[in-house]
Amino acid sequence: MARRKRREEEHENHERWLVSYADFITLLFAFFVVMYAISSVNEGKYRVLSDALTNAFKNTTGQSGGQPIAVIQGSPPIPPRPIARADKLPDARKAVQREKMKNVADDIMNALQPLVAQGKVRLLETSRGVTIEINDSILFPLGQAKLQPASISAMLAIATVLAQSDFPITIEGHTDNVPISTPQFPSNWELSAMRATTVLRLFNDGGVGAERLTAIGYGDTRPVETNTTAEGRARNRRVSILIDSNRPEEPTEIAAREAAAAR
């Protein structure tokens, strides 16, 4: 009878839920430990990934204060190359160029001294070289592009001086804004271009190499004085001869240059 009573007491034990509760707490603790461990690993991975992307887009090393670098996948870094310009000559060569240009200008000034004294010819020094500005009243009849006989000797004197140098020559024709419309010259464009070409042909006949000569017609687009007065229009009708101190640079095809740089 006593044994039966003991079994009933064991059956009615109300503390057994603590076992299940303890198991649950243990599992819950293990779950949070695992979650914490996973979150810590991901945070480190994300930090590494973030640093790598930042360094890649900034082209820098991963260390603070490091020098910027550019890395090309599969090939060594290519150092930057300076862009060569025709006007960036060594100092010694520049000095020689200036001396030659000065001698050419002095010779032309001496050859055209009477016309310079009359104000018909001006010599201007520019950043590109020397420009001889000739009033077209001593070169061409009004509205025509044939040289007057009296001006041919002056142009041949200039050609003789230029033939002894190797500078590129650009001949520019300019007019006033008075319209012209003839079968030969529909506009001032044609008149100015033909006048420049006429001087070019004379220079070539006087010994200046054709490869050094260029003729351009500007019409009335580049006046140096107002076109509202007779004096200003007379000043704008001119032929300018530019003696260029810069040698033409050798052209380089852009596509070929980029392909060579990529190799």
Image (tube, grey):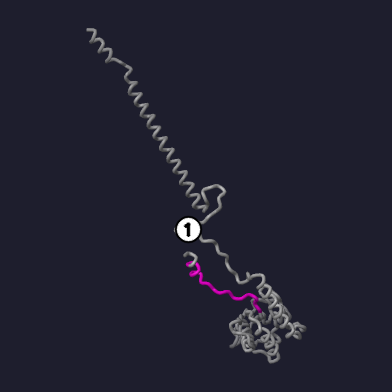
The quadrant in which residue 98 appears is bottom right
Residue at the (34%, 25%) spot, across then down: 23
What kind of residue is marked 1? Ile
Q: Is residue 95 visible?
A: yes
Q: Where residue 238 sits in the image (x, y, percent)?
A: 68, 82
Above or below residue 54? Residue 74 is: below
Residue at the (55%, 47%) spot, across then down: 64
Q: Where residue 225 sits in the image (x, y, percent)?
A: 71, 76
Q: Nearer the viewer, residue 188 or 160?
A: 160
Residue at the (70%, 83%) spot, across then down: 135
Q: Is residue 126 magenta?
A: no
Q: Residue furthest top?
A: 1
Residue at the (47%, 43%) spot, across then down: 47
Question: Dot 1, crowdedness within 10 Å: few (<14), some or many (≥20)?
Answer: few
Q: Nearer the viewer, residue 30 or 14?
A: 30
Q: Where residue 260 sits in the image (x, y, percent)?
A: 48, 67
Q: Is residue 140 left or right of residue 53?
A: right
Q: Is residue 145 visible?
A: no
Count of number-bearing discs: 1
Above or below residue 185? Residue 66 is: above
The residue carrying mark 1 is 72
Q: Nearer the viewer, residue 238 or 151?
A: 151
Chain part drawn in magenta: 242-259
The quadrant in which residue 191 appears is bottom right
Q: Where residue 28 sits in the image (x, y, percent)?
A: 37, 29
Q: Nearer the viewer, residue 117 or 211?
A: 211
| Quarter of the figure that contains the N terminus | top left
